[in-house]
Image: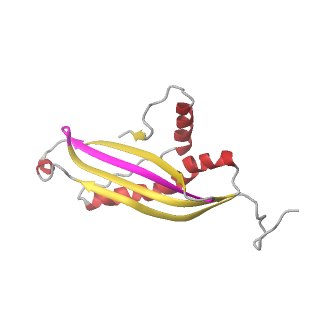
């Protein structure tokens, strides 16, 4: 017989809950200001996003999306933003084979809108037009990492570089 909790859900049923979403770290650098602000050239943008995950205890996991936005004019950095958007996620009675996809797909999908918003806000506060990061297919990124781990030919970088 299965034990049923007060809410009518079996006590041993798999569950997933967001415990906390928070901005762990964020920095802005404008190393070539103010001179570079007077240069009239089209800036080149590079965006990198990476996922870090670790287990905190039996049921809690910490996932961090690390986003880096570098904008250059004529090979000089206009601005560089590094942000870490984190979350604590509780997974109870989750089958072991489902935990890794949850950490690599579901959790980053939840965190990404916060990361994108914080980066756009920081760019705007720095006096530039905000950059809105394109959507990321975390499922495809997860599959790419699995293929890479299996030895298939995939880019050697663990993160994803978004096009301009």
129 horizontally vs 64: left or right:
left
The residue at the point 12 percent across, 53 percent down is 34
Q: Quadrant of residue 121?
A: bottom left
Q: Which residues are drawn in magenta?
A: 59-76
Quarter in which the C terminus is drawn: top left
Magenta region, main secondary structure: strand
Q: Is residue 141 above or below residue 9?
A: above
- Residue toward you, 71 or 145: 145
156 horizontally vs 15: left or right:
left
Magenta stretch: includes residue 21: no
Q: In which quarter of the image is residue 55?
A: bottom right
- Report x, y in % for residue 23: 41, 62
- Report x, y in % for residue 94: 69, 54
Whether residue 94 is visible, yes or no, is yes
- Residue toward you, 107 or 62: 62
Residue farthest right in this picture: 1
- Report x, y in % for residue 138: 53, 45
Whether residue 42 is visible, yes or no, is no
Q: In this view, does 144 lie above or below 52?
A: above
The residue at the point 31 percent across, 59 percent down is 122
- Report x, y in % for residue 112: 47, 54
- Residue toward you, 100 or 137: 100
Q: In which quarter of the image is residue 39?
A: top left
- Residue toward you, 112 or 127: 112
């Amino acid at each position: 017989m299965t034990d049923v909790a007060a809410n009518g859900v079996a006590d041993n049923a798999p569950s997933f809950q967001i415990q906390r979403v928070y901005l762990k770290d964020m920095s802005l650098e404008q190393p070539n200001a103010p001179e570079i602000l007077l240069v009239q050239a089209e800036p080149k943008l590079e965006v990198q996003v990476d996922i870090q995950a670790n287990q905190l205890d039996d049921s809690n996991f910490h996932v961090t999306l690390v986003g880096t936005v570098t904008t250059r004019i004529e090979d000089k950095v206009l601005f560089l933003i590094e942000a870490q958007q984190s979350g604590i996620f509780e997974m109870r009675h989750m089958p072991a084979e489902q935990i890794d996809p949850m950490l690599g797909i579901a959790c980053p999908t939840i965190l990404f809108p916060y990361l994108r918003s914080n980066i756009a806000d920081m760019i705007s506060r720095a006096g530039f037009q905000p950059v809105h990061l394109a959507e990321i297919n975390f499922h495809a990124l997860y599959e790419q990492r699995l293929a890479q781990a299996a030895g298939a030919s995939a880019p050697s970088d663990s993160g994803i570089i978004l096009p301009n």
